Image: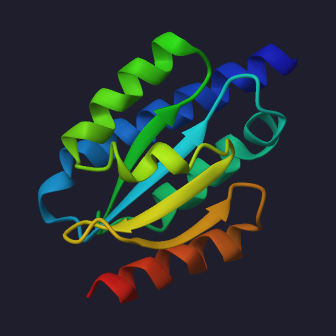
Amino acid sequence: MKNVKTILSSVAFIMLVSVSAFAANGSKVIAVVNKADWCPVCQKNGMRAMETFKANNKDMAIQFVGNDLTNDKTKAESRKALKKVGLEKAMAKYNGTGMVYFFDADSKELITQISVAKSNNELAQAMKTAEKAAN
């Protein structure tokens, strides 16, 4: 059952990041989602958090970028995605799994951060805070 949850969480994560990548042009906020397959917080909360992010990002104001810290291969792939959005250096000091870091898309300054273990309301509020700060 644990493996099924991990797989479903990974699929939800990939779907959210893929959808957000298409909306990257008009985004004012870039949210970097740090996850790892071995992370218990990610396993327990990842799918719920991704559903909350998707439900609260209908206007695609936030571009989600995955930062998979599972192993060296996934880290290398994630560095490429971070480099594309100009956050490779900024994310070097943010390596906590089960965390989401919201950056201003223009200045690349950190706006806020939140654990995926927080409630759906707290996750949605973090998104609103980030959007408001980037305007």
* Residue at horizontal 51 percent and vertical 59 percent from the top: 101
Q: Pick the residue in front: 112 or 16.
A: 112
Residue name at image x 48 percent, y 23 percent: 75
Residue 69: horizontal and vertical position, in percent? 58, 28
**Corner quadrant of residue 76:** top left
Give the residue at the far right of this rendering: 1
* Residue 10 place in picture, x, y as percent: 59, 27
Q: Position of residue 73 (x, y in %)?
A: 47, 11
Q: Nearer the viewer, residue 55 or 106?
A: 106
Q: Residue extending furthest top?
A: 73
- Between 96 and 133, the residue placed more toward the observer is 96
In the displayed structure image, the side of residue 125 where residue 16 appears, left or right: left
Marks counted in the figure total 0
Residue drawn at the location 69% of the way across and 23% of the way down:
37
User: The N terminus appears in which quarter of the rendering?
Assistant: top right
Residue 134 position in % (x across, y down): 30, 82
Q: Which colour scheme appears in the figure? A: rainbow
Give the answer, above or below, for where 77 lies relative to 88: above
Query: In the picture provided, is 71 more to the left or to the right than 133?
Result: right
* Residue 2 figure quarter: top right
Residue at 47% from the left image edge and 56% from the top image edge: 54
Q: Quadrant of the C terminus?
A: bottom left
> Is residue 26 positioned above or below 124 on the image?
above
